[in-house]
Structure formats: C-alpha cells, structure tokens
Image: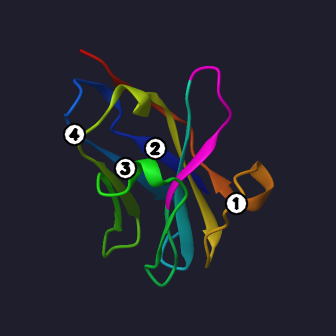
Amino acid sequence: VQLQASGGGLVQPGGSLRLSCSAFGFNLDPYAVGWFRRAPGKEREGVLCISRNDDRTYFTDSIKGRFTISRDEAGTTVYLQMNSLKPEDTAVYYCAARWKFCSVLVGDNYYDHWGQGTQVTVSS
C-alpha cells in the first residue's frame, strides 16, 4: 500500500503545474485525498482535499480560484491542478489518504497513508 506524489518542478510566476497522487496496492475511491505542503522554514499546512463523495475542502484561502482537485475514474490517481502560481506557493507538496472524509487536522495520525513529497518551486 503506497501513495506516490509526482509532477513537481520549477515554474515561473503565473505558470501552472499539475501534481498527481497515485495509489499502489489499493483503490482511492473510498478515501478522501488531501494535498499538503511545507514551505521552507514553515510548518506543514493543508492545501485542498477531496472526500469520498467528491466534496472539496479548502484548507487555505490563498489557493481559492487557482487550485483545483479531481480524481480519475479508475480510482488510482488524484490530481492537484495549480494555476497562476506565486512564489509563495513554493513548497514540498505531499498527498495523503484518509478513510471517507477529509480532516482539517494535518498531523500524520489524521491520515492513513502518506506519499513522499514533490518539490514545487515558483521563481523567475
């Protein structure tokens, strides 16, 4: 059972990236999947989560109107589409899965499975 986050990279301000959270050994359909990030020198914060019922939970207002979350029909991948990226979006991004519903608490114990991070750098 494993989650793998991918799709990070270096992008200029105003650019876009799509991160993928892929599941190996289990199906994501019954799970809520959240995206989190840790910027240099800061604590991990929640970004956006999608529940089993496809309800969205925004953990921070700073990404509203710019980031969207979706899942594929096969139940294997959840995407984080990031548009209009800003330098303050620079962070290591993580995905995590939790049974059924999103948790607004971002500690390790509140999600069942965590992926490794993928670096997103927004810089000119």
Comparing 110 with 27, the one in front is 110
- The crowding category of the residue bearing disc 4, from other C-alpha atoms within 10 Å (few below 14, some 14 to 19, many at least 20), is some
Helix, strand or loop at disc 2? strand
Q: CA distance from mark 2 to mark 3?
A: 6 Å
State the residue at coordinates (58%, 52%).
2
Range shown magenta: 40-48
The answer to whether the residue labelled 2 contacts the one labelled 3, judged by CB atoms less than 8 Å apart, is yes
Q: CA distance from mark 1 to mark 3?
A: 18 Å
State the residue at coordinates (20%, 33%).
14
Residue 20: assigned label: 3
Q: Quadrant of residue 68?
A: bottom left
For residue 46: magenta?
Answer: yes
Q: How is the image coloured?
A: rainbow
Mark 4 lies on residue: 16
| 78 with respect to 28 (left or right) | left
| 65 with respect to 104 (left or right) | left
The quarter in which the N terminus is drawn is bottom right
Q: CA distance from mark 4 to mark 1?
A: 27 Å
Q: Position of residue 44 (x, y in %)?
A: 65, 39
Residue 111: assigned label: 1
Mark 2 lies on residue: 5
Q: Position of residue 22 (x, y in %)?
A: 43, 54
Q: CA distance from mark 2 to mark 4?
A: 17 Å
Residue 31 higher or lower than 104, as above or below: below
Q: CA distance from mark 2 to mark 1?
A: 15 Å
Query: Which of marks 4 and 2 precedes in the sequence?
Result: 2
- The crowding category of the residue bearing disc 2, from other C-alpha atoms within 10 Å (few below 14, some 14 to 19, many at least 20), is many
Query: Which is closer to the viewer, label 2 or label 1?
Result: 1
- The crowding category of the residue bearing disc 3, from other C-alpha atoms within 10 Å (few below 14, some 14 to 19, many at least 20), is many
Query: Which of marks 3 and 2 precedes in the sequence?
Result: 2
